[in-house]
Amino acid sequence: MLNGIFTALATPFTTDGAIDFPALERLLQAQLAAGVDGIVLLGTTAETPTLSADEKKQILDFCIPRLTGRCKIVIGTGANATAAAVENTRAVLPYKPEAVLVVTPYYNKPNPAGLIAHYKAVAAVGLPIILYHIPGRTGLKLPDHVLADLLNKVPQIVGIKESDYDPAHVMETAVRYNGKKAYLCGNDDLFPQYLAINAAGIISAAANVFAPAFVQIYKLFKQGHADQAFDLFAELYPHIKACYAETNPTCIKYMLSKRGFGTATVRLPLGNISPEHQQQIDQLLPTAPASWMIR
């Protein structure tokens, strides 16, 4: 159900910070044309913490009709207050997503009992859950035994978006849940490693710009051409790294603006990228073959 390339969609803004719906329309159509398997709405890359409840609804009302029947849909509903995560999840029930993406609560750093209760409360809403594990943003790293207990007690968790850089944890999780949970890469720069450990796919921010390349890498690997897949990834790698020269999605939105998909505007507390990184991207982006990028 959750196999393949999922783009964690950015939210284009006008220069005055309003949602740029014409640019969002172009971005959606470009992603579909690139052949992505799914779209993640209202994730980190969407700058969801800066969106009002009304804006979130506007985005879903705009995007869902354009995506339904054309790709899989995942909606981010996580929050660091359980009541808010439950409310967010209940609010997306009418949109019938394949799953909701629920990050481990940030800042609070819940203990194991609280974490299990949190996910049980969200699961009670009735939608499948992808657990989003990103210790670098949340300050909460799940020990293997806690993750095992959580997944055992909350069977509605059908997948894991893994954004930890601990190779031992990544391997332990991949082996333990092989064939049982959809294990999704959350780090674009580690995509080949995840494919090699039988991950179901990737939820990618860089795919906002480079969706065709990610789709091709995935297809080559699944067709048994691992060497060719890695060769393509190696060529793409400098561009992936440039996407994260500063906090996501600042560089990605700058790249999108250079491709004609809205402005580079982000909402505070994110600021525009430095002139040095703008120059780096200005020099690097034209070196990417057109076949790698959305258009």
Image (spheres, rainbow, N blue to C red):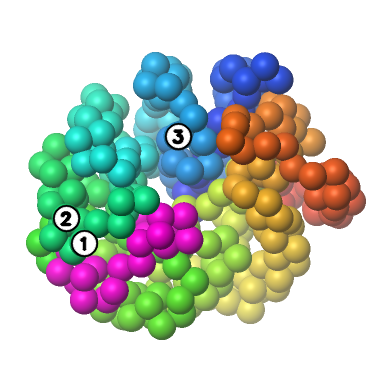
Percent of width and height locating residue 8: 50, 44
Name the kind of residue labelled 1 in the image.
Asn
Residue 136 as seen in the image, left or right of residue 112: right
Q: Magenta residues, as a range?
A: 132-151
| Magenta highlight on residue 149 | yes
Name the kind of residue labelled 3 in the image.
Pro
Q: Earlier in the sequence, mark 2 or mark 3?
A: 3
Checking the image for residue 114, the label placed there is: 2
Name the kind of residue labelled 2 in the image.
Gly
Local packing at callout 3 (Cα closer than 10 Å; few below 14, some 14-19, many 20+) is: few
Checking the image for residue 239, the label placed there is: none
Determine whether 235 is above or below 107 in the image.
Answer: below
Q: Which residue is mark 3?
A: 49
Percent of width and height locating residue 13: 62, 24
Name which quarter of the figure residue 179 lies in. Answer: bottom left
Residue 19 as seen in the image, left or right of residue 160: right
Q: Secondary structure at mark 3?
A: helix
Residue 229 as seen in the image, left or right of residue 273: left
Q: Earlier in the sequence, mark 1 or mark 3?
A: 3
Q: Which residue is mark 1?
A: 111
Q: Secondary structure at mark 1?
A: loop
Is there CB contact under 8 Å for labels 2 and 1?
yes
Quadrant into which the C terminus falls: top right
Q: Nearer the viewer, mark 1 or mark 3?
A: 1
Percent of width and height locating residue 60: 40, 24
173, 114: nearer the viewer: 114
Local packing at callout 1 (Cα closer than 10 Å; few below 14, some 14-19, many 20+) is: few
Alpha-carbon span between mark 2 and mark 1: 5 Å
